[in-house]
Amino acid sequence: MYGYSGRILHIDLTERKTWSEDKPEEWYKLYIGGVSMAARLLWENIEVGCDPLSPGNPICIAGGIFAGTPVPVGGKHGMASKSPLTGFIGDSLSGSWFSLALKRARWDGVVIHGQSDSWVNVFIDDDRVQFRDATKLLGLNTYETEEAIRDELGDDQVRSATIGPAGENLVLFANVTNDGRQAGRTGHGAVWGSKKLKALSIRGTHGVTVADPETLMKLSYDITQAAQGPHTAKYRIYGTATSVLKMDRMGLLPTRNFREGTFEHADLVSGEYMHEHNHVKTIACAQCPIACEQMCSVKDGPYAGAMTGIDYECLFANGPNCGISDIRTVIKLVDLCDRGGMDAMTNGVTVSWAMESFERGVFTKEDFKCKKYPEGFEPYFGNGEAAVTLTEMIRDREGIGDLLSKGTRLASRITDEERGTESYKWAMNIKGLENAGYDARALKTFALGLAVGTRGGCHNRSAAYDPDITGETDRFTVDETRGRVAGRSEEYAAVYDTLPLCKFIRRCFTGKADRAGAWPAIAKLINATTGWDFGYDEVDLIGVRAHTIKKAFNIREGWTRADDHLPYRWQHDPMTKGASAGYVVTDEELEYMKDLYYEYKGWTKEGLIPKSKLIELGMDDVAEEIGV
Amino acid sequence: MKVTVEFLGVAGLAAGTREVTLELPEGTTFRQIVRRLSERYPDLVGKVIAEDRETMFGSNILNRNGKTVIRDELLDTCPQDGDKLFIMAILAGG
Ligand code: SF4
């Protein structure tokens, strides 16, 4: 088989044993790689209904079809486990050298089962697997852990995915870091921590064999050229942080826990401002000619020395959404999250929930006692030092940080039960995953995409804000097209997440980002890599199948139509300022759009998948289990 | 009438300015405004404004008052006095 090794590595941490599983080529044609293959491996290997932090929840990692080849932005891998935040599928993408090492070790995927009784660093050295004592690594941050492992093994080519203190402490939104990139959302770091897996290291020494190297080289060269042209200038120069002002002008920039969509200090936390005052350098994932990651540092003030890559999502969450207008504080907050190994998006949205809860009197200063401030502190919106302290407390699960380490859904439930309050009304999550940086009250198609999304409040799995923002749909109203638009959007995104290819390349095939512009080119890349005969339809089906396996997983874990919801605030509290003031998504609108969406997907009114639909997709065994 | 145009992100770099206020005769269409901008800021062409100098390039959009996207089919409609237009590239996913 070209492009793949045909092997999945299984590692049992309880028994400390490993085995190799051969998969047939037909299986690869269905699930390809990335999030789709990772989700499929999870489907096959999980104990159904298990606690996400129990040994029955495996860590599933799937490589990319293009990792280690010349195909630009193809150096990525997918990761899936049952999410401790949502109880449904937790699937993430990460990229860079770790993905390449996995491919070069000749494993298409890795499934990690069980639970170790002591902290361990698993080292995959081509075909050999070592279980190395990780006690010495405990307490090290994510970057330090990677460095320490390289030093210990005496090889700077060893690539590691690691957890930081947050993962060790089972913060439910802890993440997994490799090469400064993260499998960021849904709490993979907590799953790793529950297994006492501090790091997974890989040394791969093999080449990658493709079916038609000459064609692949030629195609890759042309795409690489285009990737350095005008279509990607926005990513290369400012990175995604440039979205701050755009969202602000449209009234969509979440501000003070999504109370408003415009921030009076937006200019001070904009990508443009940061570029001028804090930018250090631009870096890239391995195999990427675009380079969108803007490294920013704090040069003065109490947080001098903080430095990390800043993108829009972590910026909105820890800046405007916490009412913070000092970009140096935002960089410090994101740096704390990155080193501590926590999802900076969920962190910001959770801190902003705590701020609003404090301002509304649900919490008092007393609730914020900690080692640093024994008398407590007052986390009102805009109090940057309070946000920094809360982030440290979350990472260490100190004081109220223990409650906040559970994310907004659980934290609000526990608080409301204990105090008789209604803080769920401003807990900004969907299915337990905190929302991304687009206010969906006036992005109605996106609101649907988020509500039905398999992993919750995520902007990457549904790109339905794109038709709303570009005017393809009227973003303030709903109509009969929305089920189709939202469905097509998530299936489109799923193609990229499965190959995986970074979506920032999508205009570099022909200049047009739509299916007609990209799928024929992607089919050629797949065929030159594997020797298969994919065309437009086969590429399109990659996304449909990827989404279906994730949905099937959720159904098997107990999903019902009621789980496709929106936060209370988006349905009841209109914004009062800016271009999107005055809108909510009513129950009637949401339920109408859900009907349209399930109909487009060919599912039942309750959102279940007919057997025939699954069989059509070649997923007969899935049909047996959850088809209706 | 007066219309203000704000160039966001790379559009601002290409234009060499963040904002411009245009004095326009009544009845000026958006298409004419795009043409005028491409003449005044030629570096926008091929990066932000398409080579035809009338439509937007790639993922760039022309947005009126933060609410309405002036898509190609609306280019022959007119702004109102005091309108604020935004020129920006949309980023998505990652
Ligand atoms: S464009 Fe950015 S996120 Fe995408 S592969 Fe390149 S560096 Fe990574």
Image: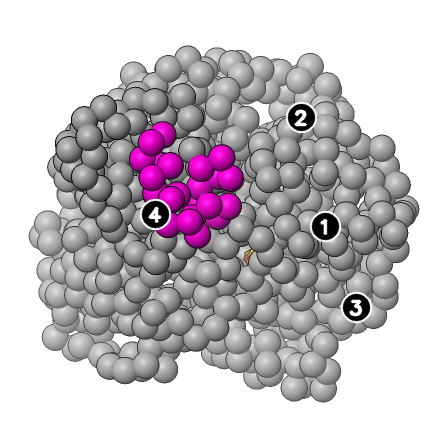
**Three-letter amino acid code at disc 3?**
Gly
Q: For mark 2, does the 10 Å Cα neighbourhood hold few (<14), some (14 to 19), or many (20 or more) residues? A: few
- SS of the residue at dot 4? helix
| Figure quadrant, ligand 1 | bottom right
Which region of the structure is painted magenta? B31-53
Residue that mark 1 sits on = A222
What residue is at 46 percent from the left and 45 percent from the top?
B45
Q: Are marks 3 and 4 on the same chain?
A: no
**Three-letter amino acid code at disc 1?**
Asp
Rendering quarter of residue A397: bottom left
Residue A618 position (above or below residue A497): above
Do the residues under discs 4 and 1 have CB atoms within 8 angstroms? no
Q: Residue A204 shows which numbered tag?
A: 3
Left or right of A564 on screen, residue A127: right
| Chain of the residue that carries numbered disc 4 in the rendered image | B
**Three-letter amino acid code at disc 2?**
Glu
